[in-house]
Amino acid sequence: MKNWKKGALTFVSLLSVTALVAGCNAGKKNTNTGAASNDGAVEISFSWWGNDDRHEATRNMIDNFMKENPNIIVKGEPSGFGDLDQVFTTRYAGGTLADITTVLYNWVPQFGQNDGFYDLDSIDSLDLSTYDEDFLEFGQVDGKQVAVPYGKNTLVMYLNKSEYERNGIDISTLKTWNDYVEAAKKLPEGSFALASPTWRFPVTVWLQQKTGKAEFDEKGNMNWTEQDYFDAMTWYKEMADARVFVSRKDYLENVGTEPVSLATNKKWLEGEYGGGIGWVAGITSDYEALKEIGDELVIVDYPIAEGGTAVNLLSKPSLLFVVSKDTEHPEEVGTFLNDFLNGEEANKTLGLSRGIPASAAAIESLTEDGQLTGFLKDGYDYAQEAEKINQTPFYEDGTLTSIYTTEMEAVELGKTDLQTAARNVYTQTKEQAAKLAKDYKLQ
């Protein structure tokens, strides 16, 4: 185990929150960073994306931080979810990144090479001992800690228990995919048992269960064959035809082309989408939307594919934070980021606006504050305990996602056959994976 020079308790697991004696003060480490007064205050910038709730919580946290740290002015740079790749790439190339920037997992190896981001280990005011060290590896490039992952994201399944009960379905009896096929028959015409923002999610999990392997190995090589893709796509098509998964046609007509939150969608609120598959960090809004209308959303066991031996869910870090290599105030940046990740009051203010954090100090604060309870705690506990397979950084590469979307959409809309689509997915995915592995220096 690596000995962090920041000096605090070492945690073997994210769940060992009760051992965190110093958590309440973690966000106040080294707040006196050299700027002595308001007149000489240092300005740093922080960029993030999200919805209105996340924006409000973040602004409140920043305001509170500046009151406690009058020598540091934090300029917030919020945005929506659109064109994230393009915006980041443009700012990185132009040298205009914020001092602290929110990033996606695949950006870390792509842009973190050759000292592309600041080495976080060199910032004394930032304490990462509140993280499981294996988890921190998601933010490492060439042996350097160039990013810190905010939380661990696992794909989970959840059902509108109230809607299922209205249709005479006891969700405790749903154990296999065949059970969901039978349940879908009891749903009204135009309704679907589950909504997945992309068919890639259930297909990937199905193949991980069948093969025991991720789509790519740690070097970026393909683990699955063309036949594997054909079998998985055939299974998915059968499930979509049986209304277990929302059809692509229905999704395009009622949600759109982008994988977005269902929380404000009419079909979600009216129970026509009876449940969903999604990242545990992003399901809060779906739960809250149903709670407001009196329906109950619950976490359920993810079915294991016939012939599979383990649930083998998708796992990856949620959003991460990097520090600009050009920052002029690394210690002040570290002070703010440390408070954001570990501070007691900061995390009570931020709440679950970014999903469930990975910092043990943050977990303790949220648990004591009563924010990590009920549905959210159930999702967290399930994700912690379930067997998972970690994804390579380029799993959500835009080109790879487009390959899947285009081919399965063509199948569902009757423009091509499964054999051709599977061949295209395999061939094009293999080509793009090889390119990314080279770009990311995995090989």
Image: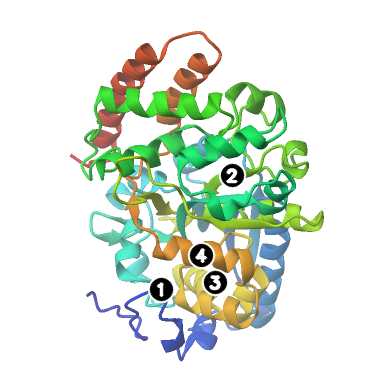
Q: Do the residues labelled 3 and 2 touch (CB within 8 Å)?
A: no
What secondary structure is found at the residue carrying circle 3?
Answer: helix
CA distance for labels 1 and 4: 11 Å
**Residue 319 x, y percent position in the rendering:** 49, 54
Mark positioned earlier in the residue sequence (2 or 4)? 2
CA distance for labels 1 and 2: 26 Å
Residue ID for mark 2:
276
Q: In the image, is residue 53 above or below residue 259?
A: below
Residue ID for mark 1:
14
Residue at image point 30% right, 22% down = 426
Mark positioned earlier in the residue sequence (1 or 2)? 1
Residue at image point 50% right, 8% down = 415
Residue 341 vs residue 411, the one in the foreground: 411
Residue at image point 69% right, 46% down = 168
What secondary structure is found at the residue carrying circle 1?
Answer: loop
Residue ID for mark 3:
336
